[in-house]
Amino acid sequence: MTAAKGKANSKDEGKDKGKVNGTAKGASDGRGDSVGKRSSSGKAAGGCGPGTVAELVQAQWGDQRVGARCGERVLTHHELAGGAAARAALLGELLPRGAEPHIGVLLDNVLEYPLWLSAAALAGAAVVGINPTRRGPELMRDIGHTDCALLITERRYLPLLTGLELEPGLGIGPGHGPGPGPGHGPGPGPGHGLGPDPGPGPDPDPELGPDSSPAPAPRPAPGPGLGMVSSERVLIVDDPAYEELLRPYEGVSPRDTLPVAGRRGAGAAPGPGTLMLLYFTSGSTGAPKAALCTQGRLAAAGRSLVDFLGVRRDDVHYLCMPMFHGNAVIAGWAPALAGGAGIALRRRFSASAFLPDVRRYGATYFTYVGRAVQYLLATPPAPDDRDHPLRTGFGTEAGAVDVARFAERFGVRLIEGYGSSEGGAAIQRTPDTPPGAIGRPAPGDDLAVVDPETGDELPPARLDASGRLLNGEEAIGELVNRGRSSFEGYWRNPEATADRTRGRSTGGQAGAGWYWTGDLFFRDTEGFFHFAGRTDDRLRVDSENLAAAMIENILARYAPATGVAVYAVPDPVAGDQVMAALALRDGAGFDPEDFAAFLAAQPDLGTKMAPRFVRTVAALPVTATNKVHRVALRRTGFRCPEPVWWRPMGEGPMGEGPAGTGPMSHLGHPGRPGHPGHLGYRRFTAEDRDALLDVYREHDRMALLER
């Protein structure tokens, strides 16, 4: 038993459409009464605040201001702390002794997510964010690899779990037991035990694209079959029995909960080194790695962003990015918790619902990834686009063009930052950061751009008056942190952990102990860092290294395009060719002459940067975290179902030599470099594809198309 049982607090939370009235047990003046007590001024105290997330949660107790909203449901900070304490106590009852205290959370952005984050902090447990777009063996591997002892989910996701061969107690399948286990009632329930269910799923948004808001598995049909589930350690938050499980713990204070038993031992209060999060890095190839994040690191990140962003107690952080990823938790939830601000949740990102939600909740801040910004810019302009309380967005990969467009249209400042998911390096934007740059190193980081093979620091980049990089070949390298980083490793993956800090060059000594980000950057003569892509986004065209991100920044200026992705396709003979995918505005067709004229007018477009192939799509494919799925684009290359346009490779081996020479001269050519026809595009036909594939076969490079 981890806490004295009391009466459940969930009933009152559901009254009056979820809004709580009256004064709850333990209420004070609304500012908390524990370590980390919040300032009564408009701005929360950052800097040297509480050292753990548990202390931040405890500081909510007694604060009767609104703390969270989701649909019609409203909880105060006090109720959030009380709900977290109840769940922490329940966790102590359900967690098998000796098991890793890891809680898998397979939920959309609903109030149960932050409640279980806070509960884990109080109990000294760790939340594992489970990606709902994973299926079958991949999903099973994620849950099993992270040693989840308890799984929190909702009815909509039960079909994903049915039949998976999980650890004993976590398996789900009809007919495996005499009756319902805890949390599995005999039929459909009205909500989460905290008020009405916020809705059945995502807002259907055609501009989101096919993969950006993945549809969940269908809900199970109501009936007794749902109750015949074997697991006693899978809690279904929208089942009536879940509310009954929480009822005995009503009124439990967050100070009364005790840490759960596990690898740290019972009775040890959570400290800065207590594991808090296991979240998978958003890699698109291979098995994802589960990065570690302790309470100390998460609390410090929250406090740092409070100061950096100027978080105020009356702010509302809109959490529309998926909470199974670090973006929403580290940059959205944590600074709200540390700064005493409120949060508002959206099940899944919806471009059409974004501004209505912002106005409804009074949201002042949100986090984003670049694709989300493009989706918002693709919505039809309206006269009231600036009529909202939103001040700031914080994220990455939006690009300078989209940042400027967003500010012009919505009046909202987007702050582009850089921080590896693992916490190994961070770059912060300063007021004097020039356009196109990310910023300078965060305090305490010793960042450098080095040769990824030798570890030697590379010379500063030289830019001309138009911003064109003049010495990319010698200036672009991998970003490393040579100082003390907050990287804490990967769960049960010593090889991947060592790879982040391994040495380079012969003998492995150069850079040993540094944090290697895997990202390409260059540093200008003033010391500002510029993002140049991922290490696997580097292209080599005619023996010249190019960075996909730099070409994307140029193509993003093309007005008919709502989204751009640049990636390498293997050249039939040697090196790579540049391919671009363009998402066009509704009703817009690709005009090859207009696109060629646009390219010719760009002063910073290098001679090797113009795309050889252009694929036009309705929406760019994205990962579950709304990042462009470049691996999928690379694998399909020019062998894709959508229309492709190209500049035929008829001039020398790379298409840039004397006309009529080289192994591909029979494919035709658009003209010599410098000639008006040099950037001419035409449709890539089936005959073109077959002829080009013959060249790949001739040079034994077909296998590269499957990389």
Image (cartoon, rainbow, N blue to C red):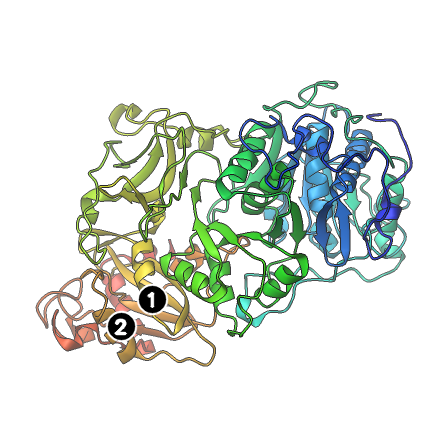
Res. 291 visible in picture: no
Three-letter code, disc 2: Phe
Question: In the visual, does 31 lie left or right of 271?
Answer: right
Extreme residue in the left direction: 658
Three-letter code, disc 1: Arg
- The secondary structure type at the circle numbered 1 is loop
Name the foreground residue: 296 vs 151. Answer: 296
In the rendered image, the vertical position of residue 138 relative to residue 307, given as above or below? below
The x, y position of residue 438, in whole percent, is 36, 46
Which dot marks residue 598? 2
Binning the other alpha carbons within 10 Å of mark 2 as few (below 14), some (14 to 19) or many (20 upward) gives some
Extreme residue in the front direction: 41
Name the foreground residue: 242 vs 444. Answer: 444
The x, y position of residue 553, in whole percent, is 33, 59
Q: Is the C-beta separation of discs 1 and 2 under 8 Å? A: yes
- In the picture, the quarter occupied by the N terminus is top right
Q: Earlier in the sequence, mark 1 or mark 2?
A: 1
Binning the other alpha carbons within 10 Å of mark 1 as few (below 14), some (14 to 19) or many (20 upward) gives some
Q: Residue at x 43, y 45 (%)?
A: 417
Q: Report, in whole angstroms, how far the alpha carbon at label 1 lies from the one at label 2.
A: 9 Å
Res. 207 visible in picture: yes
Which dot marks residue 374? none
Question: In the visual, does 162 lie left or right of 404?
Answer: right
Q: Check disc 1 and report the residue beneath it.
A: 557
Name the foreground residue: 585 vs 352. Answer: 352
Q: Where is residue 155, by image quadrant?
A: bottom right
Q: Where is residue 666, by image quadrant?
A: bottom left
Name the foreground residue: 211 vs 178. Answer: 211
In the rendered image, the vertical position of residue 515 relative to residue 421, given as above or below? above
In the rendered image, the vertical position of residue 408 relative to residue 486, given as above or below? below
